[in-house]
Amino acid sequence: MKPYEKLVVCGSEYHFKLTTANAVALEEELGTDVLSGLEKLTEIKTLSKYLFRAAVSQNDNINKIEDIYQLIDDYIADGNTIDSLQELTMDILLTSGILSQNAYDTSKKLKENSSAELLKLLEGLTKKP
């Protein structure tokens, strides 16, 4: 198993792993358990909380949630998407031992299926009669 997940933003490398102490703090912030909180991962504030808690113990220059907000802004400015940060969060949970490989694979399949359905829906909306 990898010791942590990596993300390169503006030429700087950041490490992410959710420790037990930070998982507990994340649950307190979310008001639910770490896995149930994933239901709101499409919310930027929830995504930011996951990333902050996974980064704070691994990076000396990440000390407050605003550091993650800036990291996300820089990541987007580099041409990346929020969607890829959501995928990174799932990778972090797998690496941290919170998600099993089976649960991880299942969630990836569900996401792929829902993305394919969304594309079909969008194509149907954009076709001219």
Image (cartoon, rainbow, N blue to C red):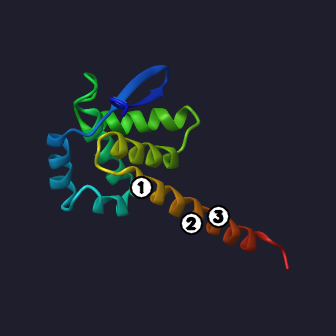
Q: Quick one: 129 or 39, which is closer to the camera? A: 39
Q: Quick one: 51 or 112, which is closer to the camera? A: 112
- Mark 1 touches mark 3? (CB < 8 Å): no
Q: Tag 2, which secondary structure?
A: helix
112 vs 127, left or right, is: left
Q: Residue furthest bottom?
A: 129
Q: Which residue is mark 2?
A: 114
Q: Residue furthest right?
A: 129
Query: x, y percentage for residue 94?
Result: 36, 45
- Mark 2 touches mark 3? (CB < 8 Å): yes
Tally the marks: 3
- Mark 2 touches mark 1? (CB < 8 Å): no
Q: Which residue is mark 3?
A: 116
Q: Quadrant of the C terminus?
A: bottom right
Q: Quadrant of residue 122?
A: bottom right
Cα distance in 3D space between marks 1 and 3 = 21 Å
Q: Which residue is mark 1?
A: 102
